[in-house]
Image (cartoon, helix red, strand yellow):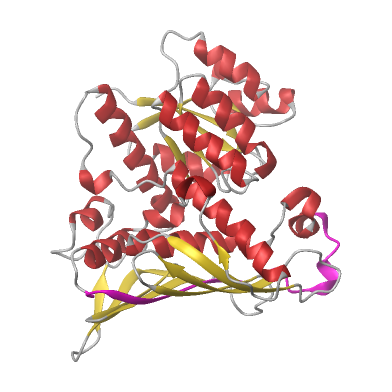
Amino acid sequence: MRKLQWGMIGGGEGSQIGPAHRLGAGLDGLFEFTAGALDHRPEEGIGYGRSLGLGDRAYGSWQDMLAGEKAQDNPIDLVTVATPNSTHFEITKAFLEGGFHVLCEKPMTMTVEEGEEIVKIARTTGKICAVNYGYSGYSLVRHMKAMIARGDLGKIRLVNAEFAHGHHADAADAENPRVRWRYDPAQAGVSAQFADCGIHALHMASFVTGQDVTKLSADTVSCIDVRVLEDDAMVNFRMDGGAVGRLWTSSIAIGRQHGLGIQVFGEKGGLRWSQEHPNQLYYMPLGERLQIIERGEANLSPEADRTSRVTIGHAEGMPLAFANIYADLAEAIRARKENRSIDPAADLYPRAEDGLRSMAAVFAVAQSGKEDGLWCDARPPMFR
């Protein structure tokens, strides 16, 4: 079976996210890295791309890459956009309209209006537009989703999600350029910590429950006074299936490292999972003893089995979770090429619609935080 061809924009030398994408895309042998515009500096981008084996398909800009790939007899099947946030909309729009499937890093856009436009373009062109909420690729997160969908917990009552770390807690580091931009509205938009980390936790809540957020109330604060945007937020939300939600996100929680976790409580039981300990899912059926579900054990769901690669007891980390998103996309692209239905266990990659809902939530949190926790509609206008 011929590998699908994959390209990347951004993620150049020294990038934090670039290696994770290259590992994830190449892990299962489904994609071949064949094209890239890896740096906003043309010469550096071309040089680094060639060092990775891209040859004359190492481009100096995304515009050159778009034109070059459209002219190829065998162009890329998928492009990943891993550039600064403010460029996501322009690049994603151009490649969708150019006839390419796209995986965009989050946030998909900087405004709700841009998000709605991307959703419409993806629907009109028929091209896949996925958003990299990569933590939804973990095997036991998918098993959690499957357990909830088949009714193991009964009706879902409460979701508690967190994404809290302490890596921006030092006030003396507030003027560090690598930190400062995150809290600058001119560069980050209307939200800092919630837009950076909180939306991962919110997407996780929707992903595992199958419910979308309809309204929310937020308490946002800048614990370090010189920051304009929030470094801590507590968000209460309601979901369209009746679940109540609580979400805490922070960058000043000293002692917390990564801090992404989720708990779901239903009529018949509860589930708990943490990204720092991804091999265990804790399940408490009503009136019974606590059970620990191990990644890789027998008799899990097809969704979990499909996304587990190494034997039980060995850790699988973030690049493998990313690889599961890429495996989903490879199956979706091949299904379209072969005019067949996608494997249901693979039909789990986050869509443009998810990116749009996240951006609507970001603006709702910002509005609510300014208005002392006013309950705000968290839905984008096109979904109301």
Which corner quadrant of the image does residue 48 belong to? top right
Q: Where is residue 347 in the image (x, y as percent from the top left)?
A: 29, 44
Which corner quadrant of the image does residue 65 belong to? top right
Q: Position of residue 291 (x, y in %)?
A: 23, 81
Q: Position of residue 162 (x, y in %)?
A: 51, 72
Q: Write the residue at 33% across / 34% down.
A: 330
Q: Position of residue 127 (x, y in %)?
A: 41, 28
Query: Is residue 325 left or right of 57 when viewed as pictured?
Result: left
The span picked out in magenta is 153-177
Q: Does the magenta stretch include residue 171?
A: yes
* Above or below 272: residue 67: above
* Above or below 313: residue 333: above
* Above or below 15: residue 285: below
Query: Is residue 313 left or right of 223 when viewed as pictured?
Result: left
Return the residue nearer the eye: 376 or 173: 376
Q: Write the residue at 27% across / 45% down.
A: 346
